[in-house]
């Protein structure tokens, strides 16, 4: 039995279709990433799986329990960390943990070994109101509260949004340690680089899944050559490459542009000659390996061209 099963689930809000026939399986003990931008449908799917929303059609189960019929049993067995900080800001760190433990008829002491590595980082502030913690500390407290009853499946909806890069890295290190204890996790994120920290990922856009596989397998399936290109005038560079008759796609990535060619025989020297003819300076062109974000953008392009 897979801990999470989703079969042809759809959900609409009025005329807006948030999910379109979503199907996926999360395997025991894995960190499964739902990767996509804001508005892609990630939170809607999470709310269905944690029994806060009803699907319009399709079926979903968590730990073999139906999300509609068995919602009470599911709520006792899962942990949920929503995207927005949802703890009690006027209660202290320790009071929040004690409260959530009592809801599940357990105690902080009983499951301390599970949250020890996380809680020790916020324990010096145990008497501070949760609302006065920093973003990274709020994140650790929310994770501790979601784990306090030792759930079998943990749902984390955009847990690193709004925190600094160091806190994001620390958080994912914590998730790896939790995963080693056999807890299955479904994590959503808009940050493409976090996909590499997952065992498998599903790329989602406009309520539809575009691809599901391991991050490395998705990258290996990238079907085009890829070039990283930079020059002194980035704005004019993207304009010229957009209108270059040998460009398939071009997107900004940090300080460079990533280009896939319409003609796969295109060479770096030909791109440089084209840019020189357009009076660009400080030109750099190199063929590179794709990352998950390149794959996501390519899949989006394929969908739009259908």
Image (cartoon, grey):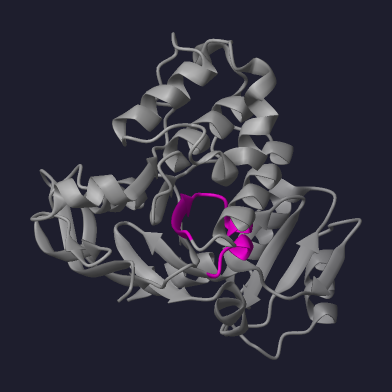
What is the count of numbered marks? 0
Residue found 23% across the figure and 52% down from its top: 74
> In percent of the image, x 52 and y 19: which residue is there?
94
103 sits to left or right of 220: left
In this view, 298 is above or below 54: below
In what quadrant of the picture does the N terminus appear? bottom left
**Is 305 or 184 nearer to us in this picture?**
184
Q: Nearer the viewer, residue 146 or 139?
A: 146
Would residue 12 be found to the left or right of residue 208 on screen? left
Res. 106 image quadrant: top left
Is 146 drawn above or below residue 252 in the view shown? above
Span highlighted in magenta in the image: 183-199
The verdict on residue 141 being magenta is no
Farthest residue in the bottom direction? Answer: 265
Q: Is residue 39 visible?
A: no
Residue 42: image location, x then y, percent = 35, 51
Residue at the far front: name it. Answer: 110
Percent coordinates x, y for residue 198 in the rendering: 56, 64
From the image, which quarter does the C terminus lie in? bottom left
Could you tell me which residue is drawn at 13 percent across and 54 percent down? Answer: 70
Q: Nearer the viewer, residue 141 or 116?
A: 116
Q: Is residue 217 left or right of residue 238?
A: left
Q: Is residue 194 magenta?
A: yes
Q: Position of residue 160 (x, y in %)?
A: 56, 40
* x then y, percent, for residue 72: 16, 46
């Amino acid at each position: 039995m897979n801990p999470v099963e989703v079969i042809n689930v759809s959900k609409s809000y009025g005329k807006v279709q948030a999910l379109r026939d979503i199907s996926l399986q999360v395997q025991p003990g894995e960190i499964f990433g739902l990767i996509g931008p804001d508005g892609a449908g990630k939170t809607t799917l999470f709310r269905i799986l944690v029994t806060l929303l009803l699907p319009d059609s399709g079926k979903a189960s968590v730990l073999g329990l139906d999300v509609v019929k068995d919602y009470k049993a599911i709520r006792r067995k899962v942990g949920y960390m929503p995207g927005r900080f949802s703890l009690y800001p006027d209660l202290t760190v320790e009071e929040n943990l004690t409260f959530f433990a009592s809801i599940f008829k357990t105690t902080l002491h009983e499951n301390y070994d599970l949250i020890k590595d996380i809680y020790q980082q916020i324990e010096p502030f145990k008497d501070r109101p949760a609302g006065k913690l920093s973003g990274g500390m709020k994140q650790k407290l929310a994770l501790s509260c979601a784990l306090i009853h030792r759930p079998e499946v943990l749902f984390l909806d955009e847990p690193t949004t709004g925190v600094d890069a160091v806190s994001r890295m620390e958080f994912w290190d914590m998730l790896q340690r939790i995963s080693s204890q056999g807890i299955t996790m479904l994590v959503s994120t808009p940050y493409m680089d976090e996909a590499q920290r997952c065992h498998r990922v599903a790329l989602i856009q406009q309520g539809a899944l575009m691809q599901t596989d391991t991050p490395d397998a998705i990258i290996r399936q990238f079907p085009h050559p890829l070039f990283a290109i930079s020059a002194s005038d980035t704005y004019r560079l993207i304009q010229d490459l957009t209108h270059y008759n040998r460009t398939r796609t071009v997107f900004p990535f940090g300080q460079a542009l990533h280009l896939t060619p319409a003609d796969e025989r295109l060479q770096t020297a030909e791109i440089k000659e084209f840019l020189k003819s357009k009076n660009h300076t400080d030109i750099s062109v190199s063929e590179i390996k794709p990352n998950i974000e390149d794959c996501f953008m390519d899949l989006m392009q394929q969908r739009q061209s259908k």
